[in-house]
């Protein structure tokens, strides 16, 4: 009996598809074994400690899952995800509960209701970023306060500790003058961003009950007029918006962005959004603030998002109006939600162009 080549290819494709689905389900089932250990623990801190203890194995399973999906086409990936959707369940709910507050005497007291915010914007800064903060404060942050005064949208600068006492003295003086800086007890530095950023989300979740949390860099200019259109794209839960990066290589060795603590078999990162500007839902902010992989040292804080969110049913929303490397060609205001690498003296020009309906232009070297 003769069998057509097309039939053989179809049978082979089905076998490959089922194989991909099986491996994906296998990895998810391994992840579920970690989650199962948490279900009998009502105490948030206990659940998080268990996750932290299992982080090495958990990271390896995430890596295996990523490698399996990375080798297959989009149809296979969607099919595999559909098969495991019911198994992922409400894993994020494990950390999406009010956390008790610990006093200095280690007495546990009930968590008080937190002030509500529709959107809270973290502006990631550092002690020496006074000029950047001033430029943002006098332009888009000022516009944000005026435009959304009644909408529970707020932005603050977050600064880590500097080893320079004089620099910190200036930061505290600046905070006294403007009341818009939050100092976190963590040393600032490029190589520690992957550890610092989760602490920013933890701080925000301890301060506010925000439906959505955004993070931008202090040298990022934001078109606040477009914030409503960005939020309209978001769902209430498990949603992650930004300029999504796919297939980004994991660098090793002495490179400033090297990730030498990740498994050697992880050659590319799971999809993640550029850290220039992201918006996530409250449940994901809680997960970032209490990450099961909290001991991992990573330089690339944005790639950490991709690793942490990858095993869960998180919807990624591509937002191409975010420009991480400046703007090579001038864009209309409607095409620019945020621009990175903006020198302090260019913030006012970009805001003026927006208010006048003029094109937005910026590069590493200046603005027009």
Image (spheres, rainbow, N blue to C red):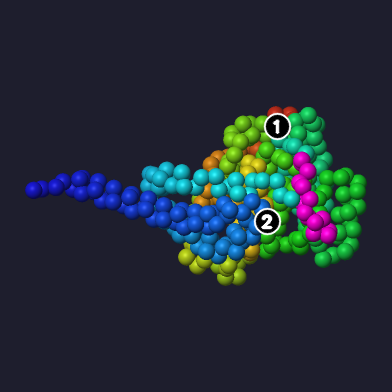
Residue occupying image coordinates x 57% and y 62%: 55
The one of 66 and 32 positioned closer to us in this rendering: 32
The x and y percentages for residue 310 are 52, 51
Q: Quadrant of residue 107?
A: bottom right
Residue occupying image coordinates x 78% and y 43%: 112
Q: Secondary structure at mark 2?
A: helix
Left or right position of 335 against 70: right
Residue occupying image coordinates x 82% and y 40%: 138
Between disc 1 and disc 2, the foreground one is: 2
- Residue span colored magenta: 101-114
Q: Which residue is mark 1?
A: 225
Give above or below for 129 relative to 86.
Answer: below
Left or right position of 128 against 88: right
Mark closer to the chain start, 1 or 2? 2
The x and y percentages for residue 157 are 78, 48
Give above or below for 152 relative to 279.
Answer: above
Left or right position of 261 against 177: left
Reply yes or no: does residue 266 show up in magenta: no
């Amino acid at each position: 009996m003769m069998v057509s080549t097309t039939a053989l290819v179809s049978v082979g494709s089905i076998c490959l598809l089922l194989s991909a689905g099986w491996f994906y389900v296998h990895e998810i089932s391994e992840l579920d074994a970690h989650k199962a250990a948490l279900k009998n623990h009502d105490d948030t801190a206990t659940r998080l400690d268990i996750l932290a203890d299992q982080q090495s194995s958990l990271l390896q399973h995430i890596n295996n899952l990523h490698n399996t999906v990375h080798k297959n086409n989009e149809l296979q990936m969607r099919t595999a995800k559909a098969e495991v959707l019911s198994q992922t369940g409400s894993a994020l709910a494990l950390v999406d509960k009010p956390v008790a507050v610990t006093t200095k005497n280690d007495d546990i007291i009930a968590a008080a209701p937190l002030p509500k915010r529709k959107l809270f914007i973290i502006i990631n800064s550092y002690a020496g970023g006074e000029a950047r903060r001033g430029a943002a404060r006098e332009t888009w942050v000022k516009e944000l306060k005026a435009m959304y005064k009644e909408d529970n949208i707020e932005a603050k600068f977050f600064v880590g500790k500097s080893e320079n006492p004089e620099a910190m003295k200036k930061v505290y003086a600046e905070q006294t003058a403007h009341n818009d800086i939050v100092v976190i007890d963590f040393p600032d530095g490029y190589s520690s961003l992957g550890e610092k950023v989760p602490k920013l989300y933890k701080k925000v979740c301890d301060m506010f009950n925000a439906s959505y949390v955004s993070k931008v860099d202090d040298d990022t200019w934001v078109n606040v007029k477009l914030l409503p259109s960005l939020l309209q794209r978001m769902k209430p839960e498990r949603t992650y918006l930004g300029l999504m990066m796919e297939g980004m290589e994991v660098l090793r060795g002495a490179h400033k962005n090297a990730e030498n603590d990740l498994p050697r078999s992880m050659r590319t990162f799971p999809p993640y959004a550029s850290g220039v500007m992201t918006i996530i839902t409250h449940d994901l902010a809680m997960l970032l603030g209490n990450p099961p992989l909290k001991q991992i040292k990573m330089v690339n804080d944005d790639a950490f998002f991709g690793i942490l969110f990858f095993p869960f049913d998180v919807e990624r929303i591509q937002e191409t109006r975010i420009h991480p490397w400046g703007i090579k060609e001038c864009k209309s205001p409607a095409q620019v939600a945020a621009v990175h690498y903006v020198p302090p003296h260019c913030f006012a020009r970009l805001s003026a162009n927006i208010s006048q309906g003029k094109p937005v232009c910026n590069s590493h070297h200046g603005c027009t």
